[in-house]
Image: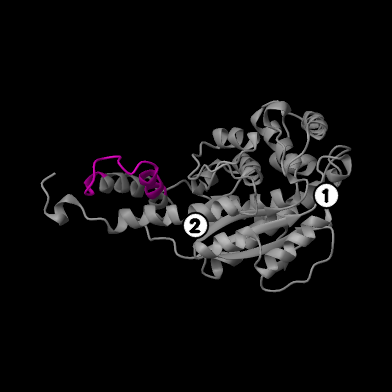
Amino acid sequence: MDTSEDLLAETLGSIRPLDVEAMHAARARQSQLTKPPGSLGVLEEVSVTLSGIQRRCPPRVPEELVVAVFAADHGVVASGVTPWPQAVTTGMVENFRAGGAAVNVLAAEAGGDVVVVDIGVASDLKEDEVVWVRKIRPGTADLSRGPAMSRTEAHDAVAVGIQVARDLVARGYDALATGDMGIGNTTASACLISFLTGRPADEITGRGTGIDDDMLARKTRIVAEAAARIPGDADAIDVLAEVGGLEHAGLVGLILGGAAARVPVVLDGVIAGAAALVAQRMAPDAIGYCFAGHRSVEPGHRAALDQLGLRPLVDLDLRLGEGSGAALAFPLIRSAAAVLRHMATFESAGIDA
């Protein structure tokens, strides 16, 4: 069996830039559709990107969405960065399993499914068709006191995400959406974003699930100190190991695996944005396969999207996580493909342009 390092190397070697010829053809076709040029705004660029992903114009309309929710716990919770107990992570995984969470409802409305990957929940969970147990370790260490995980564990977690992407595509899903669950994960996200964008902690650290001023000050200090520990020449795996979460590493793998399989990856909020920055450092071309489902109110998410060069499709002051914003955005992506594929051209409609 391949090691996690081998799987990562193979995946990185399979990621190719978007197909330029297909994108050129998509832009040309957009100019021929029965509408003023550019009148569908961002939807037009979405359709061009889909053509580049699929290497065909017009692109197929994505039909089968799955939200992959990576769940993990965080040792930094012990340092007082959230009022929520760690047990909430386990409780929410069971809520996902039962179909009662917001992401279950929103994914169903988008015609999609939800799969939960236990990549690092502190408690033991039962595996079934909804919850896949791929635990690397039961939660990270406290990043305020030292590395969150070992380099080997970070590698292994990325490999889990790659394999999950492969398995989901093999099951027939043609669009992957990122989801996450883990009390304390906005702290780890802020650390990743601060280091990878070079922005100071006080600009990108937010209130997460709702914390008071004192707790925000403590959280910001922890983020600043943890990000400052990382050597400037650290590679992506070292950055993950030092301050990342196991779900971040899994999402990195999902993004890379989706790009290698040439399927669109719809990013959710600040957790996914942090993971995408790590993926960008590993394989810049992988970000071409990503759509920003929405913009979170978390300040770090704006910084992440700026560096990724992605424009959010939805901006509704969301801050739930779970994959909720990604699920909301999927119908827009489908609509963009459908317009390019099915809308009449001036020639086919018999209209003199």
Q: Which label sits on residue 140?
A: 1
Q: In the image, residue 38 lies at what x, y percent?
A: 30, 39
Q: Secondary structure at mark 2?
A: loop
Dividing the picture into quarters, in which one does residue 162 lie? bottom right
Q: From the image, which quarter does the N terminus lie in?
A: bottom right
Q: In the image, residue 203 lies at what x, y percent?
A: 68, 27
The span picked out in magenta is 31-49
Give the mark nearer the N terminus: 2 vs 1. 1
Residue at horizontal 79%, vertical 60%?
Answer: 90
Residue at horizontal 74%, vertical 39%?
Answer: 239
Q: Amino acid at mark 2?
A: Val
Q: Nearer the viewer, residue 319 or 269?
A: 319
Q: Amino acid at mark 1?
A: Thr
Q: In this rendering, does residue 5 appear at all?
A: no
Give the farthest residue toward the bottom: 128
Residue at horizontal 65%, vertical 54%?
Answer: 322
| 78 sits left or right of 331 in the view | right
Q: Secondary structure at mark 1?
A: loop
Colouring style = one colour
Q: Which label sits on residue 263?
A: 2
Q: Nearer the viewer, mark 2 or mark 1?
A: 1
Q: Which label sits on residue 194?
A: none
| 69 sits left or right of 60 in the view | right
Asked if residue 46 is among those painted magenta in the image, a careful observer would answer yes
Asked if residue 250 is among those painted magenta in the image, a careful observer would answer no
Q: Nearer the viewer, residue 116 or 83?
A: 83
Q: In the image, residue 21 lies at what x, y percent?
A: 34, 47
Q: In this rendering, does residue 124 appear at all?
A: yes
Q: Is residue 93 above or below residue 239?
A: below
